[in-house]
Amino acid sequence: MATLKENLIKEILEINDSRVLESIRNLINSIEEESRFIRTNDEQKDALKEAKAEYDKGNFHSTDELFNEC
């Protein structure tokens, strides 16, 4: 079974319109740029610090534990 990525590659290989290809390249570039950084506000930064502190204390559950509770 072909993956989504393989299907996209096949479809892109069939495109001959340079404008469409340029648009695809621009989209990929913008996604790569956005994925490098996560912008957070002060409230989010505080929540992340608190979460890390709780994790460092061992206050967390594994995925298996959470699914077993369901």
Image (cartoon, rainbow, N blue to C red):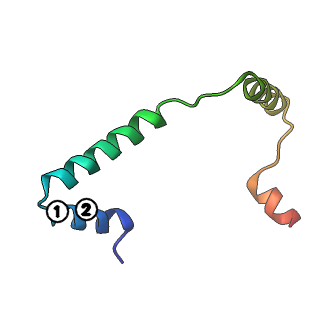
Is residue 8 positioned above or below 28 on the image? below
Q: Nearer the viewer, residue 12 or 22?
A: 22
Q: Nearer the viewer, residue 50 or 53?
A: 50
Q: Quadrant of the C terminus?
A: bottom right
Q: Residue at x 82, y 57 (%)?
A: 65
Q: Are marks 2 and 1 in contact (CB under 8 Å)?
A: yes
Residue 15 position within the rendered picture, expressed as x and y whole percent measured from the top left: 16, 63
In the picture provided, is 16 more to the left or to the right than 6?
left
Q: Secondary structure at mark 2?
A: helix
Q: Residues within 10 Å of mark 1 (few under 14, many from 20)?
A: few
Residue 54 position within the rendered picture, expressed as x and y whole percent measured from the top left: 84, 31
In the picture provided, is 34 more to the left or to the right than 25?
right
Q: Quadrant of residue 33?
A: top left
Q: Which residue is mark 2?
A: 9
Residue 31 position within the rendered picture, expressed as x and y whole percent measured from the top left: 41, 42
Q: Residue at x 34, y 46 (%)?
A: 27
Q: Quadrant of the N terminus?
A: bottom left
Q: Secondary structure at mark 1?
A: helix
Residue 3 position within the rendered picture, expressed as x and y whole percent measured from the top left: 37, 69
Q: Which residue is mark 1?
A: 13
Q: Residue at x 85, y 29 (%)?
A: 57
Q: Quadrant of residue 13?
A: bottom left
In the picture provided, is 60 more to the left or to the right than 16?
right
Q: Nearer the viewer, residue 23 or 31?
A: 23
